[in-house]
Image (tube, helix red, strand yellow):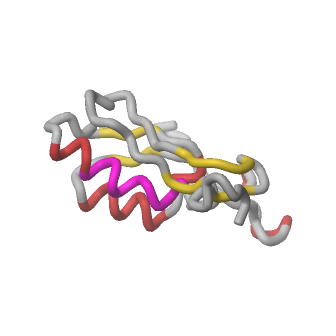
């Protein structure tokens, strides 16, 4: 237990103690419900899209930070008709597995 006066509060190393709320630019009059900060942001994507769909303001394209950038979330968003654009999270396991410019080719004619 992190806080005796609030036993439902969570703790995260980089966020601290308390709750987190997922907000979107299309957020309207609905009151956001908090969740413990130790919950992963990535789990909030699908419910957020579903909520905006219910209110008739779901985005066609959603820009998000790396916490949301998993392949699983990209697939979930696509299933809801939303194009998720977010950097992937995590780092390559080794320097050899990193992509570098030489790993790509460019068609000289079309650029």
In which quadrant of the rendered image does the N terminus lie? bottom right
| Point 32% across, 31% down: residue | 27
Q: Is residue 81 magenta?
A: no
Residue 53 as seen in the image, left or right of residue 47: left
Residue 91 as seen in the image, left or right of residue 22: right
Give above or below for 110 relative to 106.
above
Can residue 88 be seen at all in this image of the molecule? no
Asked where in the image residue 102 lies, by quadrant, the reply is bottom right
User: Residue 66 versus residue 36: which sits nearer the camera?
Assistant: 36
Where residue 21 appears, as percent x and y from the top left, is 49, 43
Read off the magenta span.
Answer: 41-50
User: Residue 19 versus residue 48: which sits nearer the camera?
Assistant: 19
| Point 52% across, 61% down: residue | 70
Q: Magenta part mainly helix, strand or loop?
A: helix
Q: Residue furthest right?
A: 95
Where residue 14 appears, as percent x and y from the top left, is 76, 49
| Point 41% across, 53% down: residue | 45
| Point 69% across, 58% down: residue | 4
Residue 80 as seen in the image, left or right of residue 31: left
Give above or below for 36 relative to 96.
above
User: Residue 101 versus residue 6: which sits nearer the camera?
Assistant: 6
User: Residue 9 versus residue 94: which sits nearer the camera?
Assistant: 9
Can residue 79 be seen at all in this image of the molecule? yes
Where residue 40 appears, as percent x and y from the top left, is 57, 60
Asked where in the image residue 108 lies, by quadrant, the reply is top right
Asked where in the image residue 92 lies, by quadrant, the reply is bottom right
Residue 43 as seen in the image, left or right of residue 57: right
């Amino acid at each position: 237990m992190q806080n005796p006066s609030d036993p439902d509060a969570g703790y995260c190393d980089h966020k601290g103690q308390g709750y987190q709320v997922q907000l979107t630019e299309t957020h309207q009059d609905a009151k956001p419900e908090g969740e413990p900060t130790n919950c992963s942001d990535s789990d909030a994507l699908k419910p957020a899209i579903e909520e905006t769909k219910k209110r008739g303001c779901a985005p066609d394209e959603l820009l998000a930070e790396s916490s949301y950038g998993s392949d699983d979330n990209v697939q979930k968003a696509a299933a809801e008709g939303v194009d998720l654009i977010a950097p992937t999270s995590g780092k390559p396991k080794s320097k050899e597995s990193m992509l570098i410019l030489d790993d790509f080719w460019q068609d000289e004619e079309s650029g």
